[in-house]
Amino acid sequence: MTPPWRARKRSESEQIERRWAHVGDEVLVLGIVHLSGGAHGYQVRSELQSWGAEIWAKIKPGSIYHALKKAAADGLLTEHAEPGNSGPERVLYRATARGRDEIVELVRDGLRRTHDPTMLDAAIAMLPMLTRTDAIAHVNERVARLEAELVGQAKGWENPNPDIPEHVRDQAELWAGHARTELEWAKNLSKRLSEGAYTMADDPGSWRTVHDPLKMRF
């Protein structure tokens, strides 16, 4: 029988995992609405489809509309009903000040959080939400975390536990290989940002996605 404390701990862990399973969707949806100045659900969906997000973010059409509704319920977006061109009313979503702050914090977290490729992908997609200095700082934090993890792993294998199966060493080396590649990538990203790459939030003519909330212009 599973002890109550273990069941409770697992339940809390599962809740956290479920929460983070949808955060990538939230980052992308909130980011597009904010950067567009306002968008309808079908515009958000079409924009993400044009990015191929259903493949790399595993985001589905239904989850886009769910994320919009949830964000509105949480006070991150406002909803404005508008008459349709030749059909039912449609909803125009706009980001609130709280919603913008939420996006920025999620992008920061995605940049510095290791072992979470979904969040990293979403954060990179919304990188221009940050100022240049802010983006560099959080990418550099990722660099520091990866370096520390690689050092820790190397020390751990200096005197490996004899009870650990031999093949697990190969598994650990696979992760280390991924981490070394990611570390090099993160350092290069930091360097490019320092050299002025990309149009960031504090740059003139900052990046936008759907330019007109009432028309499709992709």
Image (cartoon, rainbow, N blue to C red):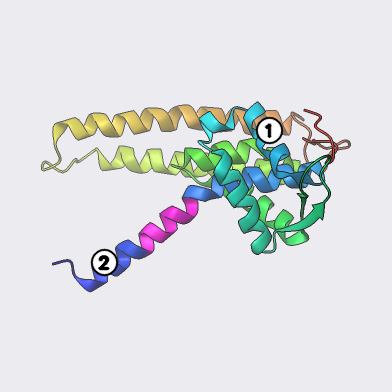
Q: Give the vertical position of 95 relative to 3 (above or below).
A: above
Within the image, what quadrant is residue 74 found in? bottom right
**Residue situated in front as seen by the camera: 19 or 198:** 19
Which amino acid, mark 2? Answer: Ala
Residue 182: x and y, percent? Answer: 49, 31
Q: Which residues are magenta?
A: 12-20
Q: Which mark is residue 7?
A: 2
Q: Give the vertical position of 26 relative to 176 (above or below).
A: below
Please tell me whether mark 1 or mark 2 is closer to you in this view.
1
Residue at label 1?
46
Q: State which quarter of the image contains the N terminus.
A: bottom left
Q: State which quarter of the image contains the C terminus.
A: top right
Q: Can residue 111 be seen here?
A: no
Residue 57: x and y, percent? Answer: 53, 36
Residue farthest right in this picture: 204
Residue 29: x and y, percent? Answer: 65, 45
Near mark 1 (Cα within 10 A), the count class, few <14, some 14-19 or many ≥20, is: some
Residue 79: x and y, percent? Answer: 76, 57
Dots 1, 2 in contact, CB < 8 A: no
Whether residue 181 is in magenta: the answer is no
Q: Earlier in the sequence, mark 1 or mark 2?
A: 2
Going 30% across and 30% down the picture, which residue do you hit? 173
Going 50% across and 39% down the picture, which residue do you hit? 118
> Would residue 17 appear left or right of 155 to someone viewing this image?
right
Q: Is most of the magenta stretch helix, strand or loop?
A: helix
Q: CA distance from mark 1 to mark 2?
A: 42 Å
